[in-house]
Image (cartoon, rainbow, N blue to C red):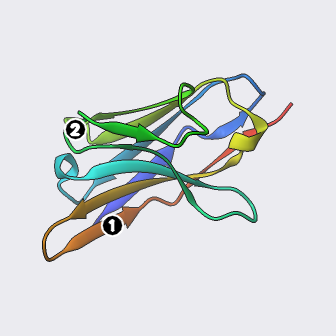
Amino acid sequence: QVQLVESGGGLVQPGGSLRLSCAGSGFTFGRFTMSWYRQAPGKERELVAAISAAGSSTNYADSVKGRFTISRDNAKRTVHLQMNSLKPEDTAVYYCNADWRGTQFEYDYWGQGTQVTVSS
């Protein structure tokens, strides 16, 4: 059974930091690209950050570059999102995603989401 379990969300003041974690099980974690998406009320889900299977490549949404850092530990089957200098516009439900695309198949898994609220 595939599971992605996020943790670390919560309420933080503007300028503060949070570290999100996602633990994966039930699939070959080290072969999947891992990403964080977010969805704010009334908005579409958007990609925040992604990291390649080996962890050698990352990419970020322009809105979070320089503030957020994605990392992974394949031995522990976890991916993290360190969020610094948080802004009210970062408020959203954050989702962990695992993606693998082959020539004939694609596997795409989602976590249940964790709420991040940035407010004074």
Q: Is residue 52 above or below residue 43?
A: above
Q: Position of residue 53 (x, y in %)?
A: 22, 45
User: Residue visible at 23% across and 61% down?
Assistant: 100
Residue 55: mark in rendering: none
Horizontally, residue 39 falls left or right of residue 104, namely right
Q: Is residue 112 above or below residue 92?
A: below
The residue at which mark 2 appears reads as: 74
User: Residue visible at 33% across and 67% down?
Assistant: 108
Q: Is residue 20 above or below residue 40?
A: above
Q: Position of residue 46 (x, y in %)?
A: 56, 56
Which amino acid, mark 1? Asp
Given the current orientation, which residue lies at the most extreme front position?
A: 62
User: Residue visible at 70% across and 56% down?
Assistant: 40
Q: Earlier in the sequence, mark 2 or mark 1?
A: 2
Which amino acid, mark 2? Asn
Discs 2, 1 touching: Cβ within 8 Å: no
User: Residue visible at 53% across and 32% down?
Assistant: 65
Circle 1 packing at 10 Å, graded few (<14), some (14-19), many (20+), is: few
The residue at which mark 1 appears reads as: 108
Horizontally, residue 19 falls left or right of residue 110, namely right
Q: Secondary structure at mark 1?
A: strand
Q: Position of residue 12 (x, y in %)?
A: 73, 31
Query: CA gap, disc 2 to disc 1?
Result: 18 Å
- The quarter of the picture where the C terminus appears is top right
